[in-house]
Image (cartoon, rainbow, N blue to C red):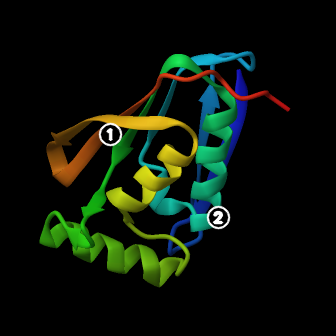
């Protein structure tokens, strides 16, 4: 496995450390990359790095699947997500629930096309992007 990005956050009590690592199966062109509950705990710079890494590793015909809370057109999908976003930003101003449109622009810059947006329990979404073009050179 090759890790392409990671985000770390501490709970407000500082007693627990949560590490989320996004890994790809093969450094020579992965068929799939999956990430759950990570983009909202990363800084925007780390989110950009994640998509850049996916762009380098995802093979033609591959998919990127991301699960978590998102905003749509700048609006929260629920009042509970708005409260969750406030608590994230109080803990770390660089974190927060991301706009689907903003992450989709990052994906599109890597040659990915949003193919599915599934509503999930607890006000989360499962976003699926596909790549039709060739994989970029892995460095």
- Residue 30, quarter of picture: top right
Q: What element carries label 1?
A: strand
Along the polypeptide, which appears first: circle 2 or circle 1? 2
Judging by the rendered image, the residue that carries numbered circle 2 is: 45
Residue 12, position as x, y percentages in the image: 50, 75
- Against 32, is 123 above or below? below
Residue 52, position as x, y percentages in the image: 65, 45
Tell which of 34 and 56 is nearer to you. 56
What numbered label is drawn on residue 10? Answer: none
What is the total number of numbered labels drawn onto the structure image?
2
- Against 3, is 93 above or below? below
Residue 128, position as x, y percentages in the image: 35, 33
What numbered label is drawn on residue 127? Answer: 1
Q: Which residue is drawn at 55% across and 48% down?
A: 109
Q: State which quarter of the image contains the N terminus.
A: top right
Does residue 43 appear in the picture of this structure? Answer: no
Q: Is mark 2 on a helix, strand or loop?
A: helix
Q: CA gap, disc 2 to disc 1?
A: 20 Å
Q: Is residue 111 left or right of residue 113?
A: right
Q: Is residue 133 left or right of residue 25?
A: left
Q: Which residue is drawn at 24% across and 49% down?
A: 124
Q: Is residue 70 left or right of residue 135?
A: left
- Against 57, is 88 above or below? below
Q: Which residue is drawn at 55% across and 23% down?
A: 133
Residue 94, position as x, y percentages in the image: 55, 75
Q: Which residue is drawn at 56% across and 61% down?
A: 42
Q: State which quarter of the image contains the C terminus.
A: top right
């Amino acid at each position: 496995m090759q890790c392409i990005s990671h985000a770390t956050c501490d709970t407000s009590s500082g007693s627990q450390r949560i590490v989320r690592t996004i890994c790809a199966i093969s450094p020579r062109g992965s068929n799939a990359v999956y990430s759950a509950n990570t983009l909202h705990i990363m800084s925007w710079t780390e989110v950009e790095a994640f998509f850049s890494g996916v762009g380098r590793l995802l093979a033609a015909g591959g998919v990127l699947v991301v699960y978590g809370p998102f905003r749509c057109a700048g609006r929260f999908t629920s009042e509970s997500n708005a409260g969750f976003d406030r608590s994230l930003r109080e803990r770390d101003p660089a974190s927060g629930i991301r706009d689907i449109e903003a992450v989709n622009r990052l994906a599109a810059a890597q040659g990915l096309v949003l193919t599915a947006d599934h509503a999930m329990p607890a006000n989360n979404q499962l976003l699926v992007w596909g790549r039709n073009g060739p994989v970029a050179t892995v460095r």
